[in-house]
Amino acid sequence: MAINYFSRCAKMNISAINPAMPPTTLSVKSRHVAVIGAGAAGLVAARELRREGHSVVVFERGHEVGGTWVYTPQVEPDPLGLDPNRPIIHSSLYSSLRTNLPREAMGYMDFPFVTRPGENRDPRRYPGHREVLLYLKDFAREFGVEEMVRFETDVIKVGILGDGKWKVRSKKSSFNDNNEIISKSNAEFDDEIYDAVVVCNGHYTEPRIADIPGINLWPGKQMHSHNYRIPEPFRDQVVIVIGSSASAVDICRDIAPVAKEVHVASRSVADETYMKQPGYDNLWFHSMIDHAHEDGMVVFRNGKTVLADLIMHCTGYKYHFPFLDTKGIVTVDDNRLGPLYKHVFPPALAPYLSFIGIPWKIVPFPLFEFQSKWIAGILSGRITLPSQKEMMENIQAFYSALEDSSIPKRYTHCIGQSQVEYNNWLATQCGCQGVEKWREAMYSMASEKRRLLPEMYRDEWDDHHLVSEAYEDFIKYPSASNL
């Protein structure tokens, strides 16, 4: 559902790409910047901001870096994640999760995600989640990011002041017996003033739930994939998995060996779809659920009926910023966060409020890096933004392009195939190298292989020439000196 925003706006005779802005002779300014979150986005943001000469404080609720890549076996007490007062588990990882991107393409540009020595490291091209966490810790250690992080610190509120600066209210957090993050009831608030705030809190904690007619009377159980960890609880059950993206593809195959039956429902296939998955005796693919009955039956649009024990929603997440008070300037409407110029800056608050990691269906770490470089350069005055009016016109052109292409509002930040053009545009603004040709080709080949061979794409591949190109490129980086 992605739209090539740049090409679309060009056809409308509306400039989507501002002329490249090389470094200027303007005096570079140092700002005091708060970064919210020490996951993959927050870590590279902190590095780029400090490289640009800014003073940086990173706020992290947990006790280590890594964000969503910090696995925990704990789940939330509300399996659907609808209770606003539930204790939040930040991670959505399941135990068996492996990356769905090859490590060479996945890593930051100048810190290759290569196999590194050490106990319990995972050398596979598509490693398990723990290897990604260790890579992020390697990155933080290599660039001294951890010294900027305030661990176990929960951001309660971020609000704009009358003089354009930002007040960040935080509170020390702690962990209960289940390793869930809780705020210390007797902890005092800390209020601090910053020139700018960069929001990097991720968007994998607030579940989206499918709307199913009759579900309120259906007697079975429901949960969201956010709270899935291991397959054993589903032994001998009939499970319906809703979704067609990475988590649904993985989880249905993860639970099939123990479940009685697994039925996968998807909106993205024709209504008559009904197919048994080759290699499995108990895994079927359907069109979307039509309705649920109070007798426990679930009816699909293909006419098939299943008596199910549980429905698992692998249906994505909502953008959620409960700490952020912009006085209504920035809103979330049907999962469109906006208005945002290039998915980063709200024009009325730019450049002192920015967001990293909002786009999806992307190779995340390099995109975070390009966005971080752009934000850091703009805050220092080395790179300039268009006027507020020009940014709003650009956003409106983008929204019109989506509407003309009949793309739903909730897909506003799904950039998919246009991500390379987006990243290269950011690189041009920053005056840095864009996406390498091998990385672009590797991503395309991996995506196609994942679509055609979901059972084996992680362990069988035919892009050896691209791997060789990547490692030739990696040699120039000190962090890859162990190759």
Image (spheres, rainbow, N blue to C red):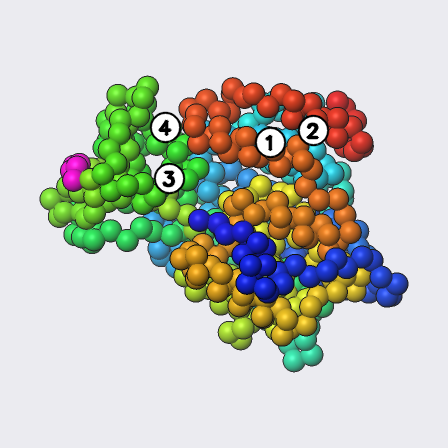
Res 324 visible? no
Of the numbered discs 1 and 3, the one sitting upstream in the chain is: 3
Left or right: where 72 falls relative to 64: left
**Mark nearer the N terminus (2 vs 1):** 1
The earlier-in-sequence mark between 2 and 4 is 4
Assess whether mark 4 and mark 3 are in contact (beta carbons under 8 angstroms).
Answer: no
**Is 54 on the left or on the right of 2, as rendered?**
right
Q: Is residue 293 left or right of residue 160?
A: left
Q: At numbered mark 1, what does the secondary structure look like: helix, strand or loop?
A: helix
List x then y, in percent, for residue 407: 42, 56
- The answer to whether marks 1 and 3 mark residues whose Cβ atoms lie closer than 8 Å is no
Give the amino acid at mark 3: Ser
Where is residue 243? Give x, y as percent: 35, 42
Distance (Cα) linking label 3 and label 4: 12 Å
Q: Is residue 328 above or below residue 57?
A: below
Residue at numbered disc 1? 442
How far apart, in angstroms, are the residues tagged by discs 2 and 1? 9 Å
The stretch in magenta equals 303-307
Asked if residue 306 lies in the magenta stretch, the reply is yes
Q: Which residue does the numbered mark 3 point to in the structure image?
A: 244
Q: Label 2's element?
A: helix
Comparing 365 with 447, the one in front is 447
Q: Nearer the viewer, residue 436 or 30?
A: 436
Residue under label 4: 253
Res. 470 mark? 2
Q: Is residue 384 above or below residue 206?
A: below
Disc 2 residue crowd, few under 14, some 14–19, many 20+, Cα 10 Å: some
